[in-house]
Amino acid sequence: MSYTDRGDHEANQGDIFAGVRFEGFEMDGMITAHDCVCDKFLAPRTSLTAEAQDSFVVAVAPVHPVSELTGDRSAHVRRHAMPRYFYLEAADGRDELVADLYLEQPVRFIDLLRCHRIASLSDATRARLWQQFMRLRLGEDYMKFLKELVDAS
């Protein structure tokens, strides 16, 4: 199951919101920032000033239906062959979606919280998102890279 109910939290990594205002365009977006970043705003240990709240940003990736991809990209995405795109299978009445991790950008958190949350990723899918980040940033052989780090320590 790709999605879960996280109605008891205001915002977490993997939450998808409708109508997010990115730089230059508006579309659905998924929080890619870690939960602890969100918590610095939502449940800070030290109160944030009004100015700090107004300027607080979190990383968000645009989300759109797989059907909007061109050429043979949709087939590659379904095989998890393009680290740029985080694939979400059709589930719970939702179409197949992709989060475009290359287009991730900072979004003011107070603006994001005004948007309607339309879905939250399950824990298993969030774990797959973390793997996707490693694959994207460290390359296809990220497991070999991580093993080399462990062996070297």
Image (tube, grey):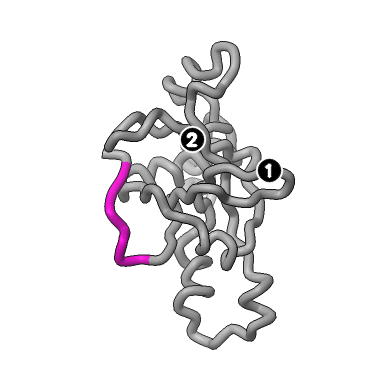
Residue ID at (59%, 17%)? 70
Residue ID at (36%, 47%)? 121
> Type of residue at label 2?
Phe
Q: Horizontal placement of 92 versus 137: left or right?
A: left
Residue ID at (63%, 70%)? 56
Residue 51 x/y as whole percent: 69, 80
Kind of element beneath mark 2: strand
Main SS, magenta residues? loop
Instruction: Report which residue position mark 2 lands on.
Output: 86
Q: Which mark is residue 25?
A: 1
Mark 2 packing: few (<14 Cα in 10 Å), some, or many (20+)? many
Q: Which mark is residue 4?
A: none
Residue 29 x/y as whole percent: 53, 46
Q: Which residues are magenta?
A: 3-9
Tell me: residue 62, above or below residue 106: above
Q: Quadrant of residue 59?
A: bottom right
Quick one: which residue is furthest to the top in this view? 72
Kind of element beneath mark 1: strand
Residue 148 appears anywhere in the view: no
Residue 149 x/y as whole percent: 53, 47
Residue ID at (35%, 34%)? 94
Residue 119 x/y as whole percent: 37, 48
Camera-nearest residue between 86 and 16: 16
Q: Earlier in the sequence, mark 1 or mark 2?
A: 1
